[in-house]
Image: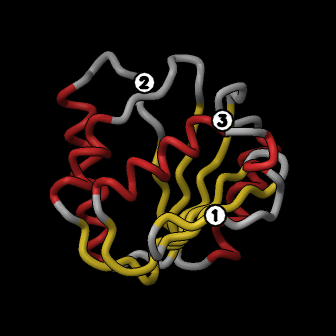
Amino acid sequence: MNSLDFQVGARHHFGTHEVWIDAPDIFGVRLTGPISGDELHSILAFQHEWARDKKNFFALCDVSKVGDVAPSTRKVLNQRTLGSNVNLVNVLYGASFAIRVLADMVWRARKVLRPNDRSDEVIFVATEEEARSLIEKRRKSGG
């Protein structure tokens, strides 16, 4: 991928799902409809490439319109690894109860299956405004 792929504000589509970059440290994701393992894998590969030289960043995730989450998608999440020097905070907004439960199960399973693997953090809030406010507070506090 070349640097033009990562222009701030540029929108990229993976099926019905959209990603964008907000300076200086936000990887935005909007999931719309069902998400397959292949689609999530492509989104995470794009994120990994963008974040290659970053030590701290946020994933701002709109999951208000996400559809079915295939078993292959959960497998992709479970297999994901971050570098030991990366601090990723996932801030999800608009999640239904079912999505919150599913995400919590996936992150707990990762901690059990790979106890020595540094895991990213997941925070749920109701709205994008709350998500951006939380990100700003975390930036100011250094984490």
The three-letter amino acid code for the residue at tag 3 is Ala
Q: Residue at x 76, y 45 (%)?
A: 25
Q: Report how many numbered discs are placed on residues in the image.
A: 3
Query: What type is the residue that disc 1 sits on?
Result: His
Q: Badge 3: few (under 14), some or many (20 or more) residues near its Cα, within 10 Å? A: some
Q: Nearer the viewer, mark 2 or mark 1?
A: 1
| Residue extending farthest front | 2
Percent x, y for residue 86?
59, 26
Q: Nearer the viewer, residue 135 or 10?
A: 10
Looking at the image, is 65 positioned above or below residue 40? below
Q: Position of residue 111 (x, y in %)?
A: 27, 32
Q: For marks 1 and 3, give the one nearer the viewer.
A: 1
Q: Residue at x 49, y 64 (%)?
A: 14
Q: Which residue position is annotated with label 2?
A: 118
N-term-proximal mark, 2 vs 1: 1
- The amino acid beneath tag 2 is Arg
- Answer few, some or many: residues within 10 Å of disc 2's Cα (few below 14, many 20 plus, some between 14 and 19): some
Q: Which residue is mark 1?
A: 12
Tell me what residue is drawn at x 41 percent, y 32 percent: 119
Residue 51, disc: 3
Seen at 49% across and 56% down, the residue is 123
Across and down, in percent, residue 66 comes to: 38, 77
Q: Secondary structure at mark 3?
A: loop
* Whole-number angstrom distance, CA of label 1 to CA of label 3: 16 Å
Q: Is residue 28 left or right of residue 94?
A: right
